[in-house]
Amino acid sequence: MTDSSPTDFIRTQVAEQLAAGKYSHVQTRFPPEPNGYLHIGHAFAINLDFTIADENDGQCNLRFDDTNPVKEEQAFVDGIIFDINWLGFEPDNVFYASDYFDQLYDWAIKLIEQGDAYVDDLTQEEMRDYRGTLTEPGRNSPYRDRSIMENLDLFERMKNGEFAEGTHTLRAKIDMASPNINLRDPVMYRILKVHHQRTENKWCIYPMYDWAHGQSDSIEKVTHSFCSLEYVIHRPLYNWFVEKLGIFAPTQIEFARISLRNTIMSKRNLKKLVDEGMVAGWDDPRMPTLAGMRRRGYTPESIRDFCNSITPSSSNHEMMIEYQQLEYYVRNHLNAVTPRAMAVLDPLKVVVTNYPEGQIEMVELPNYPQDRSRTESRQVPFGRELYIEREDFAEVPPNRWKRMSPGYEIRLLGAYFVTTQDVIKDADGNVTEIHVTLDPETQGGAAPDKRRPKGTIHWVEATTAIPATVNLYDMLFSAELPGDRTGDFMDDVNPDSLTTQSVLVEPALAKTSVGDKFQFMRNAYFTVDATDPLTFNRIVTLRDSFKPK
């Protein structure tokens, strides 16, 4: 067991139940429906399920809630498994609700035989009318008092495919006057004559979520079923089914969902972004999906750190998290593990006039200057013609300017001290070229007299620099709460969330692989998105004012 004391209401409840002997161990599960890709909100739930199990030497299952074959695909199953493994978690078991279809059917028959379920002929519209409202009780279906034998016969005929979709349902017989609408004879089974990805055409009736979920938990001996707060009103039904069947009783504990500002979490809305071409796909780096964040360059370690920084809440309100909090943990991890590289995003040519034409020397630079325990280095070519960032030159320097300017001596990182002598401009007065001279006594970037230059800037050698493309990403939505102003989140899509730029990078970056990550010195963190042509995605900028609370 990990050495940890309860730190939130969930862990406290788990600890109390173990201490009281209600359970002898901890068994959790993560139960996604395979109808889409996981996003950062799911990552929070995954982290909670797996870490609490691990803290108590327990187990965590992955169980796919594959009860609606109309919307489910194998591609989503594969993507979910990949995402969970990428996050660093390994389920103890992988199950499917469809594994339990036979048992669920047998238990449904048991409820019918007990007089606790019946077959209803009401249409969906009629059922909605009979259900009542939040302030008015519902009315009993005219088919509620069918005999047990008639219900058994009709239910079997439903299973055998004798009825059309929408003509019959199996409902639990609870209380149509209950103030909790979920207890007003909820539907347990509906007819769907569709192919299922795992059971194929064996079934034409499929269990509803509320019927399959709790019983699947019980079959797997799940001790603690963690779910979001919208399921609080479902808990009495969850417990009712378990009690009526007399089976193992898990404990359902609800917590507030998390959401990020300037983004959306709804699968339906994310799908709309994809379908309408607002993003390039589910793995677009602007998407809050784990696939998108992975392609953006976010690391699983940083996402886990982010999730661990959030204390689960029992508040009735969704926890709204600043996006910068996620970026803080991404930046913090990348700073520790990424090698440095030189890249110039907005090139300005520099000619070292007292350096021999055609001569190239190699400058040795550390790959991990932030970590003195790592000694890896690389050779970077230096020559007469270089490129620097245009923003690193000012013809008229502002106060405290510590970059290149006429008469200023600055350090070219790892190479020489240079002093600007001349500024070349075009007919419109734009600076096109800088002429500098170097001090040969400062080779390696240090002066024998220990004098200090105005500043240090990075550079690339002109003849060996590799052209590349960078994708610069910003928030996908310009509003903190997309759609809050107009009611349509699409109105707040940021038209400038992606800009593309041609850049020059040091030649060592020609030998990279997709997914490799670097800190482009004094610029930002980038990851390789493609190698032909060489393309980088900006992961996150170097600094932000956000500090975690």
Image (tube, rainbow, N blue to C red):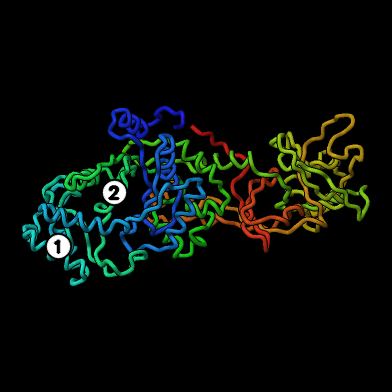
User: Height in image: 395 above or below 126?
Assistant: above
Name the foreground residue: 390 vs 199: 199
**Location of residue 158 in the rendering, given as x and y in whole percent from the top left corner:** 18, 67
Name the foreground residue: 355 vs 302: 302
* Residue in view at x 24 percent, y 56 percent: 104
Which numbered dot is residue 525?
Answer: none
- Left or right of 140 on screen, residue 278: right
Q: According to the image, label 1 marks what residue?
A: 126
Count residues near mark 2 (Cα–Cα under 10 Å), then give few for <14, some for 14-19, many for 20+.
some
Residue 151, image quadrant: bottom left
Residue 202, image quadrant: bottom left
Q: Earlier in the sequence, mark 1 or mark 2?
A: 1
Q: Secondary structure at mark 2?
A: helix
Name the foreground residue: 503 vs 294: 294
Say whether residue 137 is visible: no
Say whether residue 442 is visible: yes
- Left or right of 243 on screen, residue 489: right
CA separation, marks 1 and 2? 34 Å
Which amino acid, by three-letter code, is at mark 2? Ile
**Location of residue 462 in the rendering, given as x and y in whole percent from the top left corner:** 81, 55
User: Height in image: 291 above or below 225?
Assistant: below
* Residue in view at x 83 percent, y 38 percent: 445
- Left or right of 55 on screen, residue 506: right
Which amino acid, by three-letter code, is at mark 1? Glu
Q: Secondary structure at mark 1?
A: helix
State the count of labels: 2
Q: According to the image, label 2 marks what residue?
A: 219
**Location of residue 93 in the rendering, given as x and y in whole percent from the top left corner:** 40, 49
**Location of residue 155 in the rendering, given as x and y in whole percent from the top left corner:** 16, 63
Count residues near mark 1 (Cα–Cα under 10 Å), then give few for <14, some for 14-19, many for 20+.
few
Q: Nearer the viewer, mark 1 or mark 2?
A: 2
* Residue in view at x 18 percent, y 62 percent: 169
